[in-house]
Image (cartoon, rainbow, N blue to C red):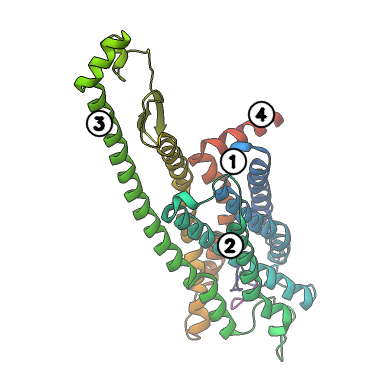
Amino acid sequence: MGNGSAGAAPCNGTGLPPAGGHNIAALVLGIVLILLIVGGNGLVCLSVCTERALKTTTNYFIVSLAVADLLLALLVLPLYVYSEFQGGVWSLSTVLCDALMTMDVMLCTASIFNLCAISVDRFIAVSIPLNYNRRQIDLRQLILISTTWIFAFAVASPVIFGLNNVPNRDPSLCQLEDDNYIVYSSICSFFIPCPVMLVLYCAMFQGLKRWEEARKAKLRGSIYGANRKLYHPSTFIEREQTGLEPEECNPYARSDHPGDYVMNNGIQTVSYPHLKYPHPGHSRKRAKINGRERKAMRVLPVVVGAFLFCWTPFFVVHITRALCKSCTIPTQVTSTVTWLGYVNSALNPIIYTVFNAEFRNFFRKVLHLFC
């Protein structure tokens, strides 16, 4: 890894610190990062497997994303940190180097493909909400998750199948040897999925906004219709025959017929089970689904934003080096964007903890067992 021109780095290999000497800072940073990634993403997987409230379709995609980060920490980072500690010199076999490059490209690609799969799944959930299975993972979601990993391996497979076996290969460097492949893998792993993902999220939130407006209008219409029925003259005739007092017929009266209040992300909705709404179960189901969907979707833009913040600099530097042979990019810049990309794998569990109360409660419960 690294001779000032190219080395093993996330998702396609770029330059790293000059060879020679022991890089103690890289060793310490690498160990801390591995522990954070394994601990945080391990808790994410454990929480979804053990907590019933977290067994949602969105969270199964989050588990797939967490698995990609876990594998990165267990299979890629130790070898990367070891080489960095050696000053960027690759002292192991070229076969192991190719395996490392393959896993590096595949796991980085799997991360962004998982984010794309989440955006597709959320778009479907908003576009056809009543036909979407929210209770358990179904065939559509299994196909989406499987496809992300199959495509990620397809992008990375040329390396393990001999792409790096070029004449005059320097065995002291672990890097991708083909510039055309660097451009191809960068486009497939980042520059195509990102715009697709952003377009889907924009369409999803537009659909969610229309859904919310329609739901509120329907709820207002239902309550207005119920009030008209309650205060219609025939209703009072009926009250006199049954002996009910006026407040007993009023859904807003103090509590002979209390309403069911539900908070949906700060919006209070109310249903009155004793009134004969048209399709009351359907109305309450839509309201409940809407609240859960909005809670789940709130965290996704933050996850995507963090991914783009961490990986965009790397891919810009990475593809620039491959396309512009005359461009000189300082080693410090390349090293910084490389580590920034790796740091993203530790961020997602922190984001879930901050923005999702259910994950936060589980993490707190687990930490209390060890503290």
Circle nearer the N terminus (1, 3): 1
| Residue at numbered disc 3 | 224
Badges 1 and 3: C-beta atoms under 8 Å apart? no
* CA separation in Å, label 4 and label 1: 19 Å
The boundaries of the magenta stretch are 3-8
- Foreground mark, 1 or 3, reads 3
| Front position in the image: 145 or 101 | 145
x then y, percent, for residue 256: 37, 12
How many C-alpha atoms fall within 10 Å of the one at disc 4: few (<14), some, or many (≥20)? few
Q: Which residue is mark 2?
A: 144
| Amino acid at pointer 2 | Leu
| SS for dot 1 | helix
Disc 1 residue type (three-letter): Leu
Evaluate if marks 4 and 3 touch, with contact meaning CB atoms under 8 Å apart: no
Crowding near the residue tagged with mark 3, few <14, some 14–19, many ≥20 C-alpha atoms within 10 Å: few
Q: Nearer the viewer, mark 4 or mark 3?
A: 3
Pointer 4 residue: 368
- Mark 2 and mark 1 lie on one chain; the one further toward the N terminus is 1
